Amino acid sequence: MSLSATQISHLKTLLQGKPLAWSALNDSVRKTLVSEELVTIQSHGSYKTVCAVSIEVLRQFLEQHFEELRGFDWNGEEFPATTTRAGLAVHSGNSKTRVIRSCPGFMVNSFSPIPAHIGAEEILISPVAGSMLFIADWELFSIPKDVLIIGIENMENFRNIRKQKYLFPTDSQILFVARYPQNGDLIRWLKSIPNPYLHFGDFDLAGMHIFETEFYIHLRERSSFLIPEDIEIRIQKGSAERYNSQYERLKQYIPSDKRLLPLYNLIQKYHRCYDQEGYIGNE
C-alpha cells in the first residue's frame, strides 16, 4: 500500500497528538490502524474522529510498514537518522525538535530465571509476577541457545503468562517476548540468534497472516505457530463477527506454511475465529 502526500499529512496530524476526522484517512489505512489497535475512535453524533493511542508506537508502526515513511522527517527538520535527544538538545537547545527513538528495544518475561548477557555483563531474567523487563540494548542481548522463545501478540496475554502456563512446553526454558512496541527490533534480534521461535497469537486469519508476514518470512522452519489441542472446540464457539470483519481484507489469503492449514481449515469450516485472550486462566 502506497501513501499519498495528503495521507501522510493526515498521519502527521495524528503524530502531533491531535484528533483527525475519521473520513480523512483512506479505507485501507483506517482499517490497518484500527485492526492493530493503534487509534481510538470517538463519536460526536454522526461525526467521528480518531486519535493515536500512543504517538511513539504509531510512529514506529508507520515507519516499519510503509517504505516511503522510513526515516521520514515528521517535523520538516533535517537531522541525521542517528541523532539522539541529547544531540538535539546540544544542537538546538530543544530535545523535542524532532521525534526520536529514545527507547529502542522490546519487552521480555519468563516463568523461571534465565541467565543472559548484555554485552559482557551477566544478568538474570527473572521478573516477578506483575512485572516485565525491557531490553533496550537489544543488539548486545544474548541468551542460551536451548531457550525456547515464545512471541506473544497481545499485551494482556503477555502480562498474564503465568495464567497460561498450561499451554506451553514443560521441558524447555522459555523466554517470552512481546510483539509490541512494533518497532522491528524484535525481529532483527530473532534473525541474529539460532533459538527456536513459537508464535502465540489470535486464532484467526489476521493472526496467521501476522505470523507469516512478520516472523515466518524471516525465520522459516525455525518458527512455528502455537495451535492448542482444544482449538476446534474454542473456534466452534468463537466470533463470527470477527471472521466477517477480516474476510474481505484476507479472503485471498491461504497460508504458505502448511503447518497452519489445519487451523486455517477449521476457521473456514466454522466461519469463526477465537481471540488468544480466551486462554488466560481458562484451562
Image: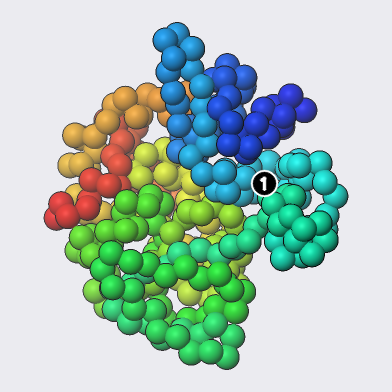
Residue 57 seen in the current view: yes
> In front: 210, or 24?
24
Q: Position of residue 246 (x, y in %)?
A: 43, 29
Q: Position of residue 133 (x, y in %)?
A: 42, 70
- Whether 224 is drawn above or below 272: the answer is below
- Taking the view exactly as shown, the residue that stands out farthest to the left is 283
Dot 1 corresponds to which residue?
A: 63
> In front: 203, or 181?
181
Q: Residue at x 74, y 42 (%)?
A: 74
- Taking the view exactly as shown, the residue that stands out farthest to the front is 93
Q: Residue at x 82, y 46 (%)?
A: 77
Q: Position of residue 271 (x, y in %)?
A: 31, 28
Res. 273 image quadrant = top left
Q: Residue at x 65, y 57 (%)?
A: 101
- Whether 165 is drawn above or below 67: the answer is below
- Name the kind of residue labelled 1 in the image: Glu
Residue 149 seen in the current view: no
Image quarter (top left, top right, bottom left or bottom right) of the C terminus:
bottom left
> In front: 63, or 92?
92
For the residue carrying disc 1, how many other residues have a C-alpha within 10 Å: few (<14), some (14-19), or many (20+)? some
How many labels were placed on the picture? Answer: 1
The reply, left or right, for residue 228 in relation to residue 38 is left
> In front: 10, or 208?
10
- Taking the view exactly as shown, the residue that stands out farthest to the right is 78
Image quarter (top left, top right, bottom left or bottom right) of the N terminus:
top right
